Amino acid sequence: MLKYTLRRILGMIPMLLLTSVVVFSLAKLMPGDSLSGEIDPNNTDPQYIAEMREKLGYNDPEYVQYFRWVTEFIKGDFGTSTRYKIDVADLISERLPNTIFLGITALIITYILAFTFGMISGRKPYTIRDNLIAGINYIGLAIPSFVAGVITIYIFAFKLNWFPSNGSVGIGLIKGSFEYYMSRLHHVFLPAIVLGALATASYTQFLRNDIIENSRKDFVRTARAKGTHENKIYNVHILRNSMIPLVTFLGFDIAALIGGAVITETIFTYPGIGQLMIQSVGTRDYPVLLTLLMLFSFLTLLGNLIADILYGVVDPRIRVS
């Protein structure tokens, strides 16, 4: 397992280098640059603009700019945000806890709903309850996250006034206090519901189908023949085997939830790295944009690695070599 993990980590290095070339090229294909994102070309002296472009190295050939950027990136110098005028590392570390909190909350909601609905549908397939849950799942798969976000804000924030429609914490609260953490939970619940509930549909279907398939296998018939209680058969024997696909999805969720948070955080004005990425595109804050894209790429590769390792851990029939 250790050798396999080390090989996969070493294999991530050339993939990240290739990703950096693609990310940098896409950024250069966008109109303008970081300088045009922080000044008004119509009201700024053209000579000053030309001098600043030369000073910042924007007139250098693209390959020179790439090697300069990737060299500094490898050293841990991600540059300075042209909008916020602070180090990119400090800016991301300030926003990242909010996104992690949102992702973990959404993941908990996803698994609670998926296990509940999947067990109900799997134990009583082709019944009214199963068909009702399937209908809810299809609606969840069909509704885009931005539509679901707008609807939930309108109903639960504006009409019912149960949850706030934006922000991550209330104003004037002392950091570290009980009221502070309760406010954070209150603010994150609505975007987490949107992010987590929409992912529940596919998980529920996977679990339902696995439960139905495993309930027809020989070891289940043997357990029934021995007089094992039906609840123990489903909760211990069948569920343990049906959990394998869901556990392996945990690795992919690392990147999927953070990627999905880009839209959700923007709709709810939730100050995480997803919203920061959208803002960096609009303001042409390329140091932030490039760093975030590389972060998302790394999390995707890391999620794939975790999924493969978990698959070998939870399923004894799989041996990672």
Image (spheres, rainbow, N blue to C red):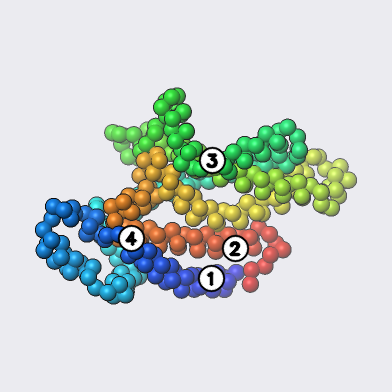
Q: Earlier in the sequence, mark 4 or mark 1?
A: 1
Cα distance between the residues tagged 2 and 3: 30 Å
Q: Earlier in the sequence, mark 4 or mark 3?
A: 4
| Residue type beneath disc 1 | Arg
Circles 1 and 2 in contact, beta carbons < 8 Å: yes
Quarter holding residue 313 = bottom right
Horizontal side of residue 141 vs 215, given as left or right: left
| Residue type beneath disc 4 | Met
At a point 49% along the width and 55% down the height, the residue shown is 255
Name the residue nearer the viewer: 317 or 189.
Answer: 189
Which circle, 1 or 3, is nearer the viewer?
A: 3
* SS type, badge 1: helix
Q: Earlier in the sequence, mark 1 or mark 2?
A: 1
Which circle, 4 or 3, is nearer the viewer?
A: 4
| Residue type beneath disc 3 | Ile
Mark 4, Cα crowd under 10 Å, few <14 / some 14-19 / many 20+, is few
Image coords of residue 71 (percent x, y): 32, 73
| Residue type beneath disc 2 | Asp
User: What residue would you read off at disc 4?
Assistant: 30
Residue at the far top in the pictured view: 160
User: What residue would you read off at disc 1?
Assistant: 8
Vertical position of residue 121 compared to residue 33: above or below = above
User: What residue would you read off at disc 3?
Assistant: 143
Q: Earlier in the sequence, mark 2 or mark 4?
A: 4
Image coords of residue 227 (percent x, y): 86, 42
Circles 4 and 3 in contact, beta carbons < 8 Å: no
At a point 75% along the width and 39% down the height, the residue shown is 125
User: What residue would you read off at disc 2?
Assistant: 308
